[in-house]
Amino acid sequence: MGVIQRVREGGGTRARQLTIYRLRQLITGAGAAGLVACNDVTEPAPIAQTIHLSASSVSLAPGTSQQISVTVAPQSGAVRLVVAGVPAGLSASLLPELLAQGETQSALTVSAPAATRPGERSVSVEASRGGGGDAVRPVYATAKLRVVVTGCPGYAIPTSCPPFPTGGNSAVSGVVVERTTAGTRPVAGAPVWAWVQYPNGNGYSAGRIVTDANGQYRFANLPNALILMQTWGEGYDMPCASVVQLTGPAAVANLELVSRAAPIAVPDPAPPALVGVVYETTSTGRQPLAGVGVYFESFFEVVAAKTTTDELGRYSLCRLPASASFVTPVLAGYVTTGRSVTVFGVTQMDLEMRRQ
């Protein structure tokens, strides 16, 4: 909406209309958030100004800091940057604060003192540009940075600090092996993840470790809860899920990998299991589709098991969680459509895909 400002000149009064522009959020191609002046533009139109951040969010541990690049565009005159709305427990500064004509970048440094409590906060950066005469009217823009302060033991994905206790005194260990038609062998350097699921529905990732030269791994600091183990890497699947109910100080879970280039469709997998064929649907009928990734999701959409269809389009997933889950076939160039499923014993489920 516009406002009227009256200015006295030579004993008379001249009405000059100034426009207050609404701000709307602008998400850049890099995912950074900003705000840009937009609606109710009067002639002559000002040059829109946008603040781009090199990251839309950052994670800080107490006692650390991070630096974010701030870019202002377009830059046709002097621009002043201000850090606004810094919440208690954080500190933030800009260098430089004044961008001369032609300068487009500044650096925002955000710090979390050692005593900062975990949680999510936001820091705003404001830019203003203005000049004399009607040709250049003041333009303002704002960008917000989401700041997550971590501090939860055992929590490895710091998108936000969960509002429940994490970590514990138990451990899960085992060996990661590759299974082939000729037998098994330990896999060194295999990444392993652990997902913790509490009975009340809360869950969190306990992080990622790598197997040693003998294929062995060990996760410490786990609570007594349901633990979903995961392992796969470049060129490998994990067709059999591994779910551990921790009730004591330690448990063992050996994990199996299968090469995606040589998938194994087991006709009688260990239950609870899901078996079937993935078909390509065409105008002339359907035919088995090889090389399809089949994902079994459970526990907050965490992938519990994953396999690849063989040359006959067959797949098999074993030792699955006995809970309502989702199975999704994925192949480049095809429409991805998942289906809900609850597995009992050995469940047969054929899946269909069509080209995009």
Image (tube, helix red, strand yellow):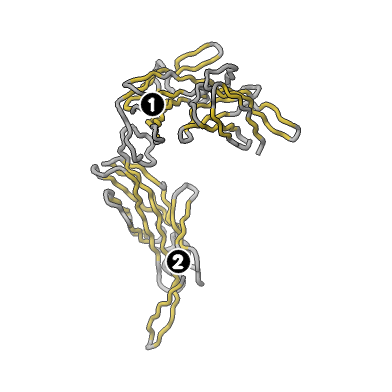
User: Could you say whether the residue bearing mark 2 is in a helix, strand or loop?
Assistant: loop
> Is 347 situated above or below 123?
above
- Which picture quadrant has residue 228? top left
- Which picture quadrant has residue 217? top left
Q: Does 152 sit left or right of 296 as displayed?
A: left
Which x, y percent locates residue 316? Answer: 57, 22
Q: Earlier in the sequence, mark 2 or mark 1?
A: 2
Which x, y percent locates residue 274? Answer: 56, 24
> Is 274 situated above or below 205?
above
Mark 1 residue type: Ile
Q: Where does label 1 land, which residue?
A: 209
Mark 2 residue type: Tyr
Residue 107 appears in the picture as rendered = no
| Neighbour tally class for label 1: few under 14, some 14-19, many 20 plus, Cα within 10 Å | some
Q: Does 182 sit left or right of 246 as displayed?
A: right
- Outermost residue on the bottom side: it is 11
